[in-house]
Amino acid sequence: MTNGRYLIPAQTHQAELEVKKSRFLCHLAHTDNIQSAKDFVEKIKQQYSDATHNCWAYQAGPVGDTREIGCSDDGEPQGTAGRPMLTVLTHANVGEITAVVTRYYGGTKLGTGGLARAYADAVKLALESILTRIKINFSLYQTIIDYSVWPKIEPLLAKLEAEEVTPVFSHEVTVQFRLDEKLSADLNQQLQDLTHGRSFVKIVEE
């Protein structure tokens, strides 16, 4: 799913995996920035402060965006928890997501390979049953049109499900609105057709 639309968690979700009597509890949550990801990690760490480890990974941006990622092994051998979890998240086609896997040691060592598989599998298990919703990136746009064009533009914006439509009337009509990014090119073409190329849509804020 591209063009400004991607899946995000619809709610906080939990799943549990047991491997050789060790319990791996995976919590997933929607986190749309790094700070909210860190806040969720801290919340789970406090909630399960008696656990052996609380390992975590997050992809706080859109699907495929690696600018807002992070992970931690939280005391497990280096590379056996956070990185495998992050790899699962970055290939899951779900954005703005944080995973915390809480481990309660069961008495049997799993080895580095076994640990990596267990942490990755715990995240995979939770992802299999998580509820998601589509996020649409709306940007702020502006156009300046003649009064005669406004009656035609207003229903067009409604049809395209533009939000926060704010017209300001002076000698012309200045209209600001938020719109799904992938629809802006189509709107711009229709606007230029209606105004014979005199008006166009420009982006004000992404």
Image (cartoon, rainbow, N blue to C red):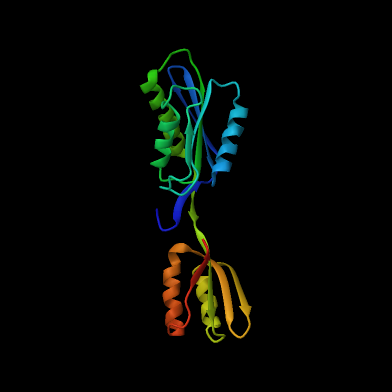
Q: Position of residue 157 (x, y in %)?
A: 52, 72
Q: Nearer the viewer, residue 70 or 62?
A: 70
Q: Residue at x 55, y 40 (%)?
A: 37
Q: Residue at x 40, y 31 (%)?
A: 84
Please tell me whether residue 138 is drawn above or below residue 26 in the rendered image. below
Please tell me whether residue 186 is drawn above or below residue 100 in the rendered image. below
Q: Nearer the viewer, residue 195 or 128?
A: 195
Q: Position of residue 55 (x, y in %)?
A: 50, 28
Q: Residue at x 62, y 28 (%)?
A: 46
Name the residue furthest left.
113
Count of number-bearing discs = 0
Q: Position of residue 185 (x, y in %)?
A: 42, 69
The quarter holding residue 148 reads bottom right
Q: Position of residue 153 (x, y in %)?
A: 52, 78
Q: Nearer the viewer, residue 68 or 149?
A: 68
Please tell me whether residue 107 is drawn above or below residue 18 in the rendered image. above
Q: Residue at x 45, y 68 (%)?
A: 184
